Structures are given as structure tokens and as C-alpha cells.
Amino acid sequence: VPYIHVRGHIEDCQDKLSPRLIPGMGMVTGEEVEPIWVELGHAGAISRDANPGHRHEILDDACGDWNFKKLVGLRMCPSVRRL
């Protein structure tokens, strides 16, 4: 649960789910949706002159690529390797 999100929960949930209190949890990003904006900005510039269907495909591919890279990167996380 992202840190900003968990602060909206009751204290009991904050104690259990806060990223700052989970062993092995890294504190490298804030809300997860924010980092993708740079990638989508590039895709948006590329698709500016595309028709609506093609623009949708370009943005969908950019999101799929982002998710794939994120999934592959999870292998490097020690807490995920234990699972």
C-alpha cells in the first residue's frame, strides 16, 4: 500500500500496512501511478498526429511495456524472491 494511501486508513491499518514498517520494503517511490507519466508523455508526443484508434494502441502499448518492465524488475527485489 503506498505511503500516501495508507495514511487515509485508521491507525490499526497504518500500523500493519505502512511501507515504513514492513521489513525489506523500499522507500524509493511515492504513489505508483506517478512514474509512468514521463513514459506516457513520450508516447503522447509520438501519437499526437495519429487517429483515435491508433493513438489508443500506442498508449496501450506504452502502458503494457511499462507493466512488463516493472514485472521483470520485481525479480531483483529480495522480498519478492522469497515468495
Image (spheres, helix red, strand yellow):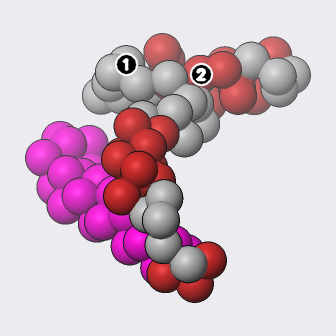
CA gap, disc 1 to disc 2?
A: 9 Å
Magenta: main secondary structure:
helix
Give the extent of the magenta segment.
Answer: 55-83
In the picture as drawn, the residue positioned furthest to the front comes out as 49
Near-viewer residue (38 or 81)? 38
Q: Is residue 37 above or below residue 60?
A: above
Residue 15 locus on image (x, y percent): 66, 19
Could you tell me which residue is drawn at 26 percent across and 42 percent down? 79
Q: Is residue 16 above or below residue 42?
A: above
Residue 75 locus on image (x, y percent): 16, 55
What residue is disc 2 on?
Answer: 3
Q: Residues within 10 Å of mark 1 (few under 14, many from 20)?
A: few
Element at badge 1?
A: loop
Could you tell me which residue is drawn at 36 percent across and 28 percent down? 25
Residue 70 locus on image (x, y percent): 29, 54
Element at badge 2?
A: helix
Q: Amino acid at mark 1?
A: Met
Indicate the quadrant containing the C terminus: top left, top right, bottom left or bottom right. Answer: bottom left
Contact, CB < 8 Å: mark 1 with mark 2? Answer: yes
Q: Left or right: 27 with respect to 44?
A: left
Residue 77 locus on image (x, y percent): 20, 43
What residue is disc 1 on?
Answer: 27
Q: Is residue 60 above or below residue 80?
A: below
Q: Residues within 10 Å of mark 2 (few under 14, many from 20)?
A: some
Would you say residue 72 sits in the magenta stretch?
A: yes
